[in-house]
Image (cartoon, rainbow, N blue to C red):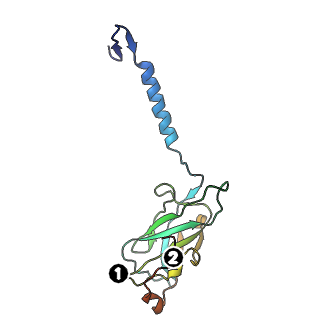
Amino acid sequence: MQGRVLHRSGNIHSFRPLRALLTASLLLSMLVGCGSSSPFEYVPATGKVTYEDGSAIPFSGTTRMLFASQSPPIDGKYYQKPAVAYVDADGTFESATSHKYKDGIAVGKHKILISASDAQGKLLIPSEYGNIDTTPLEIDAEESPFELKIRKPTAEERKNTKVEKSLY
């Protein structure tokens, strides 16, 4: 009597139609669930961040970097949220996350925001790089891998421990 049950009234009912319906529903939900609900197209983003002279920035640990899309909203209502990449101590970043983990950055131009300080709180990167209005870093998503060059902060800027208002 596998797949069948004796109902209280004594009738035998088959579970096969119910089992087939549940299996079909599960498969359909798995296929639908695999799609992206984002209206944006993403491309991989990798690269390296150094000072303009090519020397390494003495990052201590992992530093967060944001890719702020400069594209207009889709249909006037879908805005691209900034993608996040984590810069390792050697200045490299291997991926970025926009909508789903490691999905990349949206196609188009982006301003890049990055801020880092040493253990004493002294800036390793001039504060202008952490502000959407003043960052000189702008990239096109299609040009990955990126070689990002940052000017060294002046002695006066290094004394400043205050980071400007930014997306952080």
Crowding near pointer 2: few (<14 within 10 Å), some, many (20+)? few
Q: Residue furthest right?
A: 75
Crowding near pointer 1: few (<14 within 10 Å), some, many (20+)? few
From the viewer's perspective, is the residue at label 1 or at label 2 nearer?
A: 2
Where residue 69 sits: x, y (%)? 59, 65
Using the image, tell me which numbered label, if any, was put on residue 165.
2
Question: Residue placed at 42% from the left, 84% from the top?
Answer: 161
Where residue 8 sits: x, y (%)? 33, 11
In the image, is 104 to the left or to the right of 3? Answer: right
Q: Earlier in the sequence, mark 1 or mark 2?
A: 1
User: CA separation, marks 1 and 2?
Assistant: 21 Å
Query: Is residue 87 among the parts visible in the rendering?
Result: yes
Position above or below: 35 against 59: above
Q: Amino acid at mark 1?
A: Ala
In the image, is 137 to the left or to the right of 7? Answer: right
Question: Residue placed at 48% from the left, 60% from the top?
Answer: 97
Picture quadrant of residue 107: bottom right
Where residue 89 sits: x, y (%)? 39, 74
Residue indicated by mark 1: 119
| Residue nearer the viewer, 77 or 38 | 77
Circles 1 and 2, Cβ within 8 Å, touching? The answer is: no
Where residue 42 sits: x, y (%)? 56, 57
Position above or below: 140 against 133: above
